[in-house]
Amino acid sequence: MYIPSDYIIKDTAVISAFVQQQPFAQVVCAGDNFPIINHMPLLYDAGQRCLWGHLAKNNSDLKYLSNSRVTVVFSGAHGYISPNWYDKPGVPTWNYQTVHARGICQTDTSEKITQGIVDELSALHQKSLGLSWRNDYNPAMLSAIVALKIDIIDMSCQFKLSQDRSATDRQNVINALQENGQPELAEAMKQALKL
């Protein structure tokens, strides 16, 4: 991913927090003729420097994922930025946040691993809804999924949030985004100003 110097994020704490806040990712690997892309929530394990997830056992893409190099794409707030919002002339653009994690994907069918991933993902997202997690599902259902572990080789992060514009232009963009129903992108811009 090409990252101009104005937009690069190198702070590992910021990257780690972003990946945990935006867990729904695209896992991309090479296929026979075209790239293979699967969408899934992932758990970031900073201690092991890896990502955990799972796919249906009958997903034919598993043959490409096992022991393969992958790129995982995490996306955050994004949206169109009108030059009408600038104090000084400019061009239309798109503001966004993204992290690319590159690594090696391994698959595992052991019930202990798959249950751990399902339980941890579920508990995390239940908690975000203010709900508790009870793993009272039929354990036989775990035989229908395959665990994924992606050992991270490197991560790159780009927050393109009008950092190259004047303070006045950035504030105008934030105000316009709030007025136009994009509070998440406006908040991301506010936070980027603190980095």
Image (cartoon, rainbow, N blue to C red):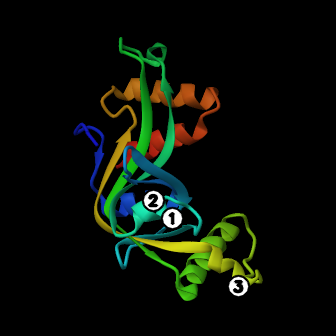
* Whether residue 13 is situated above or below residue 90 in the rendered picture: below
**Mark 2 or 3 closer to N-term?**
2
The residue drawn where x is 59% and y is 77% is: 120
* Whether residue 60 is situated above or below residue 184 in the rendered picture: below
The residue drawn where x is 65% and y is 31% is: 181
**Tag 3: residue type?**
Pro
Residue where numbered disc 3 is placed: 139
Local packing at callout 1 (Cα closer than 10 Å; few below 14, some 14-19, many 20+) is: many
The residue drawn where x is 58% and y is 69% is: 57
Residue where numbered disc 2 is placed: 19
**Mark 1 or 3 closer to N-term?**
1
**Mark 2 or 1 closer to N-term?**
2
Local packing at callout 2 (Cα closer than 10 Å; few below 14, some 14-19, many 20+) is: many
Q: Are marks 2 and 1 in contact (CB under 8 Å)?
A: yes
Q: From this viewpoint, which residue is outermost toward the front? A: 32
The residue drawn where x is 65% and y is 79% is: 142
Residue 35 horizontal/vertical position (percent): 39, 47
> Which of labels 1 and 3 is toward the front?
3
Q: Secondary structure at mark 1?
A: loop
**Tag 2: residue type?**
Val
Residue where numbered disc 1 is placed: 42
Residue 91 horizontal/vertical position (percent): 37, 15
Q: Secondary structure at mark 2?
A: helix
**Tag 1: residue type?**
Leu
* Residue 22 appears in the figure: no
Res. 159 image quadrant: top left
Q: Is residue 168 left or right of residue 12?
A: right
Labels in figure, total: 3
